[in-house]
Amino acid sequence: MHKPNSNRILFDRYAAILAILAAASYDYGMRIWLFAGIAASVSVLSEYCCLRIQKKPISVANLDAGVIGLILLLMLPATVPVSLLIMSCIFTIIIGRAMFGGKENPVIPPAALGYCFCLLNSRSEVTSFPVSKETLPLFRTDGTILEEGVSILWNRSGKFSVSVLEWLTGLPKQPIGTGSIVLLLAVLIVLSARRAASGWVIVPAIAALIVGNLALSSLQHCAADVIGSCLTNQALFAIIFLHADSDYAPPTLAGIAYGFAVGFASFFATRILYIYDAPILLAVLLSPLRIWLSRMMLFYDDVPDAVQERRAAV
């Protein structure tokens, strides 16, 4: 199968992220663009330093480090302190990327590892959100009233009491980039169609997640249950930008198997174990499974057709 051009994928990812940032800046003001510039710049600079130390060549393709920093920012609250953002971007590139295979042999989605770093350093600042959408100061947000997000309530009760307008325009008390079901679905369709994200992973992951959550519901408010399962815990965002990332996602049948594993594991971790933002954490924990499935698929593809037919017959 023809592999899509890496520069085109890089452009598609930046375009999708810029669309999400534009929607977030409408809700929270210029702080979003300022922090986006900081996240992308620090990440690219960290990538440059790592490559210089390793004496490796630098190319346009390495600008995808900026995408990693922006994905990390979009998974955080709009009130995240700038110091935490900078430290997390540096950790994400140096540890999550350079020390885990680099660009050539990626092992773990770096942004997921960076998010884990944020949680370990300051869980309260990562899981607290502005009560309502409002223009925030550029740096200090001490006077902003914060509450726990809607994901915690969803995990324990399955309640999703927000208006249809908020489904469309973006939920309050959510991370920067994960609030609007319409915007995320548009990004999903475009990235999948242009093969910048793996539809083999996305479709079964979302299907398994929705089926699991519907099984626990009364089926009286199916639309709310479906949207709640996708928007809470950053599930849809994590599936698109972490699990289905074309640099990490297993191909074809292996991708389908991995997608079902992601969906059911996300459902079990959030609704049974009450683990906050489990879909992001699973991008790290399920990395061995993803690697194994990818290698098995490559091994199968390398076997002559006659041998494959005998295996299929057995």
Image: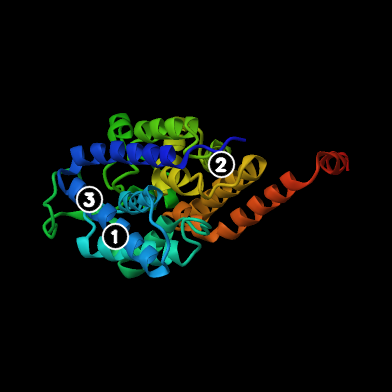
Provide the residue designation for mark 1. Answer: 45
Q: What residue lies at 43% left-to-right and 57% top-to-bottom?
A: 112
Provide the residue designation for mark 3. Answer: 37
Q: What residue lies at 28% left-to-right and 66% top-to-bottom?
A: 87
Between 44 and 110, the one lying in front of the other is: 44
For marks 2 and 3, the one nearer the N-term is 3
For marks 1 and 3, the one nearer the N-term is 3
Residue 54 appears left or right of 46: right
Amino acid type, residue under disc 1 in the picture? Leu
Q: Is residue 301 above or below residue 156?
A: above
Q: CA distance from mark 2 to mark 3?
A: 30 Å
Q: What residue lies at 44% left-to-right and 51% top-to-bottom?
A: 155
Residue 27 appears left or right of 231: left
Between 292 and 27, the one lying in front of the other is: 292
- Mark 1 residue element: helix
Q: Nearer the viewer, mark 1 or mark 2?
A: 1
Q: Nearer the viewer, mark 2 or mark 3?
A: 3
The picture places residue 180, in percent across and down from the top left corner, at 33, 36
- Mark 2 residue element: helix
Q: Is residue 286 above or below residue 24?
A: below
Amino acid type, residue under disc 3 in the picture? Gly
The picture places residue 192, in percent across and down from the top left corner, at 49, 34
Q: CA distance from mark 1 to mark 2?
A: 31 Å
Provide the residue designation for mark 2. Answer: 201
The picture places residue 45, in percent across and down from the top left corner, at 29, 60
